[in-house]
Image (cartoon, rainbow, N blue to C red):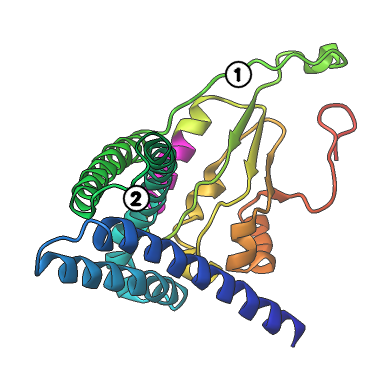
Amino acid sequence: MGRLAGLLVFISIVLGVLLGLHYYLWVRLVRDPRWPAPWGTVGAIILLLITLSIPVTFILIRRSSGAARLMAWPVFIWIGLMFLLVVTLAGSDLARAVLALARRLVHGQPVDPERRALFARWIAGGAVGVASTAGLGAMTSALGAVAVRRIEIPLRQLSRQHDGLSLVQLTDLHIGPTIGKDDLADVVRRTNQLRPDIIAITGDLVDGSVDQLRDAVSPLAQLKATHGVFFVTGNHEYFSGATAWVEELSRLGIRVLRNERVTIGEGEN
């Protein structure tokens, strides 16, 4: 009962934040600009449908519905654009508040309502343009080949035996509705080409249950490293069934670390 209550509280908070963000977008993008009919109504309906599509998509994903993949891409893209829009509009609101205060101090009267609406339209259009450009750049980066970053980490107390040890870290792969088996197979291939001594998978590997993604994560069994492949859970594993994932990854030959450490080299276990 306690877990159920906690889950209900969590869901309520998430839905509250979701509704609040979309209400803010409606105010700044639809209400304040006072678009001529029927565009204001159209904009409000579109925002309402988008708001409803987010929880519906996550429910479909949990149920492994075939419609989930069709909805996942546009919904996830919108979530990214939504936050970019909120940040952009919040910045413009701060600037507007400062300008409005300065104008009142200098002229002693508020801005004409027609000018306010025109200004709001410019702000709305500019925010959409900035968020879209940033979102396009982010998508281009995300859909491109995974970048390999080589970082040398000096450790004063590192033994000579371990000098030059190479470690590949894989994190936040989020295998699920938008990233599948072929994507992971390419990551595994490129990782093995680096011939690492250790591979560390540091959480948020999956977005879905073992039953949904067993085939998608199967390429992980091909990972090879001199001293082994290790995994620690992230919060998304707990959303997706952490215990089942620990068992599945262990079956694939990956060492799952749970409140423990291992020694690499002499006497390793």
Q: In the rendered view, does 34 fall on the left or right side of 7?
A: left
Check disc 2 and report its element: helix, strand or loop: helix
Mark closer to the chain start, 2 or 1: 2
Q: What's under tag 2, amino acid-wise?
A: Leu
Q: 26 or 191, which lies in front? A: 26
State the residue at coordinates (31%, 35%).
137
Residue 185 included in the magenta stretch of the image: yes
Q: Position of residue 235 (x, y in %)?
A: 64, 57
Whole-angstrom CA distance, mark 2 to mark 1, is 31 Å
Q: What's under tag 1, amino acid-wise?
A: Ile
Check disc 1 and report its element: helix, strand or loop: loop
State the residue at coordinates (12%, 65%).
39
Q: Position of residue 60 (x, y in %)?
A: 39, 76
Do the numbered discs 2 and 1 sit on residues whose CB atoms are within 8 Å?
no
Magenta stretch bounds:
180-189
211, above or below 32, in the image: below
Q: Quadrant of residue 201?
A: top right
The residue wearing badge 2 is 81
* Nearer mark to the viewer, of 2 and 1: 2
